[in-house]
Amino acid sequence: MAVAKPHLSILLSVVCLGTLPTALGAKGGEAFPPSTPFDIDELFSGPLDDAVCNIEAVDSVNNAQLACILSDLADTTFFRLFPVDLGRECPFFNKKGKKGKNNDTNAAEPETCSSTGPPEALPFGGAAARPPPFFGGGGGEAAEPACSVAPEAKPKITLPFTKETDQVDQSLSNREGKVLLEAYNDSMQPSFWLDLCDGIGVAGESATMVNLRKNPERWTGYNGSEVWGAIYNENCFAIYSSEGDDELCYEERVLYKLLSALHTSINVHIAMNHYPPRKGIRSSWEPNPSHFIERYSSHPERIKNLHFGFVVLLRAIRKAGPHLLTLNYRTDPNASDSSGEGTGMHTRALVRRLLQTEILTSCNEVFRAFDETLLFQSTRDGTPVAELKRDFKNVFRNISRILDCVSCQKCKLHGKLALLGLGAALKTLLLPSDMIAEGLTKFEIVALINTLGKFSKAIQGARDLTEMHRANIASLRKAVGKKNDPTNTPTQRRAKSAIHIETTSAARLAGTLELADKAVGITASAKDLAPEDEDALIDAILRFDPRPLILAKHYGKDAARFTRHALRVIAQPLVLGEFIEGQGSGGYVAKRQPDYDLAVIGGGLTGLTAALMVLDQGGKVALLEKEPFLGGNSAWASSGVNAAPLDHDGVDSTEIFASDTLRSGGGNAELVEALVKGSMESVKWLEKRLDIDLDQISQLGGHSVPRTRRSEGGMVGQELVLRISREVKKFAGPGGPLTLLTRTTAKALFPDGGDGEAGVEYLTSSKTDGVTSGTIKARLVAVTTGGYANDRDDGGLLYASRPDLKGLPTTNGRWATGDGIKLARGIGGGVVDLDQVQVHPTAFIDPKKPKARRKTLCAELLRGVGGVLLTRDTGARFVDELAPRDHVVAAMREASGGRAGEGFIILLSEKMAQVAKKHTDHYLQKGLLQSFRTLRDVATWAKLPKKALQNTIAQYNAVAEQREEESEPKQFSGSEPKQFSGPFGKEFFHNVPINSAGGFLAGIVVPAVHYTMGGLSVSPNATILSTQGAPLPGLLAGGEVVGGMHGKNRLGGNALTECVVFGRIIGSRALGAMEDAAAAAVSTGGLGTDISSIPGETIGGSSSAELKAVSLAELGEHNTTESCWVGLYGKVYDLTDFLSEHPAGPEAILEVGGRDGTEEFEAIHSKAMLDDFEPIGTLLES
């Protein structure tokens, strides 16, 4: 995992704001006042002022239902894309010689609040002794109130909340401008609140669209003290915070508490993600409970303000509910309404779930907790309601402009997002219900939902941080023996301990101290721990026994399991490398430890997933691959990976997914259950760990709903393999935790004989050393070698099980020969369903190599977007293109009279081709698809009667139109059979109608052996079973090598799903074995061990050197296996060494060797794929 650069953050990081408690009126800055013991219940209990519910009710609703739904909503494409203008000028902060952007010394300055002044200057009346409120207004025209905010000079005369286009004449006459201006300035009109959020600065020509998921809220070190000072001091909040807010009127309290909620949310997110990844110290972002406690231990009211803000946002969501349910969440204007992908179906289902009656009923107290009708109902201390409204709006808009003074772009992004969310909530609550649809813009709704999600996470995070800190402080006080010493801070304790420790690495010392701190905290939080056991653990931790420190890293959230393992291992002698302390000559005696925590045979997606999980947690892995490159068949899978939520989200569920899978193939129900239940978590793991968005959702054959996910790049298998291979390889190298052996064939397997070790014997071939042999011992050995679809010798698994398939081509690589099945059978491993082999209905006939035995797969996605299958002799349809694969193949055989090998036509309209553009561009480039202007051109190419082909398409359009006029396709619960309506039983018609005069793509496809459903017999936890059904100790398997999962037919997309789900199961099993043997896992012991390291990015190279110019002629000389250069994006790359590692084989690179391959590259990859390669030159165009 790459070490994160420390610049990701949120608005106005207050890690630098040591003055924050003072700025808000706190007296003193003790992190933990010794005279006032900290009580967790004080932060998270009691009523919410100005609301009719309590903190407990809000927490309960958030934890039970809302947090999960809001997290899922924030992950959807609609809600994670947000525009923001990051370049607007700062109008303030020009005091003491400071200048705004472009050295604008004339920028406006907000007036400074004052607690003194004549009574007539107080806008709400009263004596001068009372601090003035933050609103201006009142007092007449003669004396301007001290707390007023200078209004904007002249509002722009523009129509707010309308999409700007070049074609619209936006000019207005003076009269029209005056009418519109009066509408916004007349505080007694409902339209007064429409422009509340105009000053925040989102959308517009200068806005930048950002992906919020790639810009999370984290600590950045940015100093936002001036900005927060302006928000509080310049608007007079700070004057009150020291006295409490009892002196504020209702409207003032609401706005103050909302801003305080925003501030608290920011602080919590910073504290939860405070320490960035650092090689040798920590592998991921970690929390800093002290940062949180220093700001809130003396101010529980600020936590209540966070809950109050959450309630206000919920009230706004409920009021806007009818509009949210009718909103268009479509993100792809060309997406078919029945495809799911880009249509917003999933997003709408989540919104509906958020607003559904069950939740509203169970959360009734919370949703109705805040009453906006109490706002602006009467004069406050002599200030008229109309003026009160104007002051409220002016203050909010002034704060909006202050955000333009934030110099950290990520901070500014999240500040504007959250403030816009609050503004959208206020606007929703203050507008009449019939104006909400008109008054809320798309991105105000995006901000509203995201801000609600931020507050939801902050509420959970605040409690987690408090509990972490309470546990840590109690344990460390006990360890040092000073329970009431206010100077006994964690930092000081670490310093006192450090003077007794000798080390050559400050980084390792810091990492070890952090783990010790964490281990003490976990011990303190353990329940029912005997005093003598607690003493033993604390003693071991504080003398830096590495074993409990390793356990603390992995059991941070499970104190019971931590103490169980820790007490067991510290009772044993300390293992140091190959020796045991305290015995034998010189105090040590030799003891052999396993070579690895996990040995993986097969470098496809299953094996890579398992390896990465173990490596990420500090384990040692040996990865064996018989080819010179990683990936296997996984790199060729292109349709996607399937996933369904555990609970029904209005579209799909694991129950429906399991029903579709079992109905298609009738496989092992226990294995299918493991597959579907692990599917969504596996996809989320891929997205987070590999930094990839699998947000393109489509519906493949045999699926009752859209659930197949892929990335925008399209070729999902190849992209996953490239990304995960890159991450895994970061752990390789001298002394690294990964041993990667390519060109290595496994020759024998050895189960665990009772000594905690399984093994594999292997042969490695290399150009320099010839053939070498060896044996690897590991706690567990995983067989992930794939299937046998290319094991086509007469004695091979394929023809021995299915002799009827002789003569059929295959889509599989040369490596698919069932090696793992043969190895396991040799030691008594059981097999199942070897006769179940899937023939894929669509593999391309390459016009250049029509007799080739290996065919390029025509991805099922092409039929998923609407591709039509036609006979070659009559141009007629003959099957539901989205039926299960075995059904389509059977229909092909019947339609061709047994001559399916002669091929069929696959036809796509221009609209269909655009939806699958990455795939179709790739197939066009390889000559597998042909492009045609009209349907008549297709008929000429295919030698079909033009009239017959036109009639076929006309009939197809008619049926599609009829289907569209019927009720929406039924959403299946998973138990009942589908009720088809069209010819050949087709129900889903995507990207119709087909325009016979529009553009077309067409190719010739044939059935080909594609996947083997048979394989090793395994349990749902991936253990290989014997022929009698007993476990083979220490041996696991996953992926296509396993049998029984899919029965007689595999659903499209389930292959990659199985790889990741069972790869993660194998990885989890290996981690469990590591944990059970934690003492032996310490290979060098003591502080010299880099026990928390994860490889970072390699920094360096010759990027600063001037690249040489390469002419096209010189480039053309390098097009062989000995020297292969490729031009890409104006640069030249030497890919010679990568030829043998390319997952798709060297041929794909050699095809573009010696020339500019940018067009071919873009058809398959994203530009980010080049991150691993340094250019050697710049390509000259001529």
Image (cartoon, grey):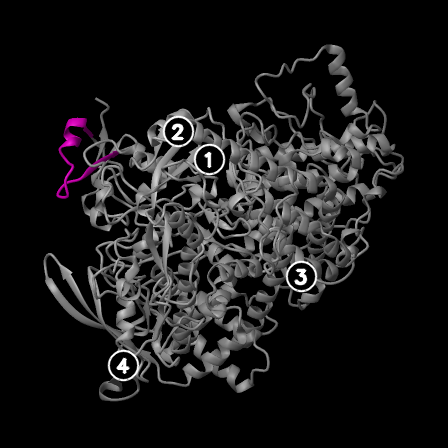
**Tag 1, which secondary structure?**
helix
Circle 3 or circle 1, nearest the eye:
1
**Tag 3, which secondary structure?**
helix
Position of the N terminus, as image quadrant, is bottom left
Which residue carries the number 2 mark? 945
Residue 579, label in figure? 4
Answer above or below: position of 59 versus 473.
Answer: above
Read off the magenta span.
1109-1127
Q: Position of residue 4 (x, y in %)?
A: 42, 50
Which residue carries the number 3 mark? 64
Q: Earlier in the sequence, mark 1 or mark 4?
A: 4
Q: Nearer the viewer, residue 170 or 683?
A: 683
Between the residue at mark 3 and the residue at mark 4, the CA separation in whole angstroms equals 50 Å
Between the residue at mark 3 and the residue at mark 1, the CA separation in whole angstroms equals 42 Å
Q: Nearer the viewer, residue 576 or 292?
A: 576
Q: Is residue 666 left or right of residue 1025?
A: right
Between the residue at mark 1 and the residue at mark 2, the CA separation in whole angstroms equals 24 Å
Q: Earlier in the sequence, mark 3 or mark 1?
A: 3
Residue 545 appears in the rendering:
no
Which residue carries the number 1 mark? 912
Circle 4 or circle 2, nearest the eye:
2
Circle 3 or circle 4, nearest the eye:
3
Counting labels gives 4
Q: Nearer the viewer, residue 264 or 642?
A: 642
